[in-house]
Image (cartoon, rainbow, N blue to C red):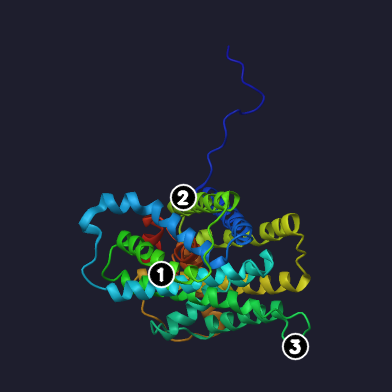
Amino acid sequence: MAIRPPFNLTAPRLTPITRAALWIVLSGICSVMMNVLIRIAAQGLHPFEVAFFRCLFGLVFVLPWIVKSGPALWPNRMAGFYLLRASIGLVSMATWFYGITVVPLATATAVNFTAPLFATLAAALILQEDVRFRRWSAVVLGFVGVLVIMRPGSARIDANLLILLLSAATGAMNNITVKFLSRSERPSTIVAFFMIYLTPLSLIPAFFVWRWPDLSTFGALVGLGCLGTIAHISVARALAAADASACAPFEFARLPFAALIGFLWFGEITDLWTWVGAAIIAGSAVYVAHREALLARRARRGEPRAPALCPGEEARRDARDYGNGGRRSLSGAISSIACARRMSRSLSPPASCVERMTSTRL
């Protein structure tokens, strides 16, 4: 007679949401550690030069894929728009690489959470999306969170936070250019030519501050490339396990980890107002994502955009749609959280990430 062990030695099978959460958390850890390596490399090199080497390693990473794809990868049109996309990406990346060296890690991470709010603004102004009162209210509240962090009028205001806001805004704009390009270009082409155009462009500002890296700095740059690769794979795995709207809340786990690393590595103490402002921004971003997920689900069902309803009726309809699967709907705002950061700073996201992002409705 077989004797059963008192406990099960077989590890339980993780649900898709759990797997996606673990991959997103791993990606966030890699992103925070990349910021640490940026700071270490910037002790011997200017941040603009660090950005160039990050671009160079990103190009090396995708080069075998570009060669394997051959002439089919090369676009026959839209060269000017590819150049525009790379220019916007360079501004986003350069401002982030500089800002992360002068602003505490947790504060920079909190400010970067405004990317989906800027994406909503860009969608309304550029893509002419119908953004109504609820999302506008969430966007305004999110920027109130930024004011809480900056505390204008106080003696502790840090003008360098404006640099990080510029990085978040141009990161959102970079996502908008992907939406335009995806109408006629393949995701693999969008990724490859972002790198091809961005690398020589990033050499221009680096040329004026050029210094050859020493061995330890070069090691940090190599580590930056390795962590970026792991982050890319983690995002692809997460989006393969669950949709972007389900992955999004776990993105905000980067903040406590950034605060912990900032304290242990650099002696940075995150004050109460930064936590309060970050909570406001994160809550606004999650609400914007929730609203866009509901709209995306209604659009896939073929429902026309209804006129504004009374609050009780609209709340009941939202609860019905969310309960029926709104958690797994894609949204442009959440795609900017999950993918635009990799597009503009990590620099070589996998095609699966771009395919997920370009399939959304901003």
Separation of residues labelled 3 and 2 (CA atoms): 43 Å
User: Which three-letter amino acid code belongs to the residue tagged 3?
Assistant: Gly
Image spot of residue 287 (x, y percent): 57, 73
Q: Is residue 99 left or right of residue 237?
A: right
When asked about the image quadrant of residue 348, the answer is bottom left
Determine the residue positioned at 44% across, 68% down: 202
198 or 169, which is in the foreground?
Answer: 198
Task: Determine the CA span between mark 3 and mark 1.
Answer: 38 Å
Q: Which residue is mark 1?
A: 201
Q: Earlier in the sequence, mark 3 or mark 1?
A: 3
**Figure quadrant of the N terminus:** top right
Crowding at label 2, few (<14), some or many (≥20) Cα neighbours within 10 Å?
some
**Which three-letter amino acid code belongs to the residue tagged 2?**
Ile
Residue in front for this viewpoint, 213 or 328: 213
Examine the rendering and report whether any part of residue 323 can be seen.
Answer: no
Q: Which numbered disc flags the more N-terminal residue, 2 or 1?
A: 1
Q: Which residue is mark 3?
A: 153
